[in-house]
Image (cartoon, rainbow, N blue to C red):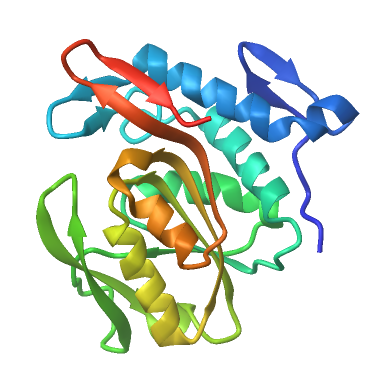
Amino acid sequence: MRYAISSSVKAGGKLYRYRFTRKIRRNLKGIIVQELEERIQKEGIVKPGNVLKVDAFLNHQCDCALFDAMGAAWAQHFQNTQINKILTIESSGIGIACVAARHFGNIPVVFAKKAQSINLDGDQYVSTVFSFTKQREFPVIVSRKYLSADDRVLILDDFLANGKALQGLIDICNHAGATVAGIGIAIEKGFQGGGDALREAGYDLDSLAIVESMDPSDGSITFRK
């Protein structure tokens, strides 16, 4: 199965119509990675405690054109994996996942909830994860109605640090008998080791920007090449 990719993406201030330009198609990920890294350098704020704030475009105010471009890059990377469902976690992953889904043929997006609510029935998959950002444990919950052994799942999220949140989503997929066909991450903090552990475990992890180091004293950010 090959996924439909939209005909244009804005990167570096230019509108690339990569469906019709073979060179752009070949270097689609490179263009989008460069754009994302430039946005991180320009608008990201490094704070003590290994915190990188990118709320200007990723997880508070959302740049939907950038989300669209990231979705196109993931669709190209995972085009032969027969993905039929996207799984993410509330709340920052939802926007990215929903925009990306159209590049995979508008497949369903399921987001794990972090708390019980009256909208959830009692038949659930539940795991527990530790939030690096909030420094506490919380449950992640998915209704059994929306995940099964028939699903080939792409897990998407905005950040990857120590990998605990992703491990919770992987656990839920394992409980459901679903296959984790791939993992897509906007920004990986490579120095925290979560991504390397997932790769060593055999997962197909596609992180668009990997931060190798960052320094709150001067705001500097370096990327893995």
- Is residue 182 toward the left or the right of residue 121 in the image? right
Residue 54 appearing in the image: no
Q: What residue do we see at 34% from left, 45% from top?
A: 92
- Is residue 78 toward the left or the right of residue 134 in the image? right
Is 109 located above or below residue 7 in the figure? below
Q: Which x, y percent locates residue 219?
A: 25, 14
Q: What residue do we see at 80% from left, 25% from top?
A: 17
Is 144 located above or below residue 197 in the figure? below
Report the quarter where the N terminus lies. Answer: bottom right
Q: What residue do we see at 32% from left, 28% from top?
A: 213
Q: Which x, y percent locates residue 208?
A: 53, 38
| 78 or 215, nearer to the observer | 215
Is 20 located above or below residue 110 in the figure? above
Count of labels shown?
0
Q: Which x, y percent locates residue 32?
A: 61, 28
Find residue 139 and report its image quarter: bottom left
Which residue, as the protein is rendered here, is positioned at the far left?
136
Find residue 28 and report its image quarter: top right
Find residue 137 and report its image quarter: bottom left
Q: Which x, y percent locates residue 12?
A: 61, 14
Residue 75 appearing in the image: yes
Q: What residue do we see at 21% from left, 33% from top?
A: 51
Is 193 located above or below residue 217 in the figure? below
- Is residue 8 toward the left or the right of residue 99 in the image? right
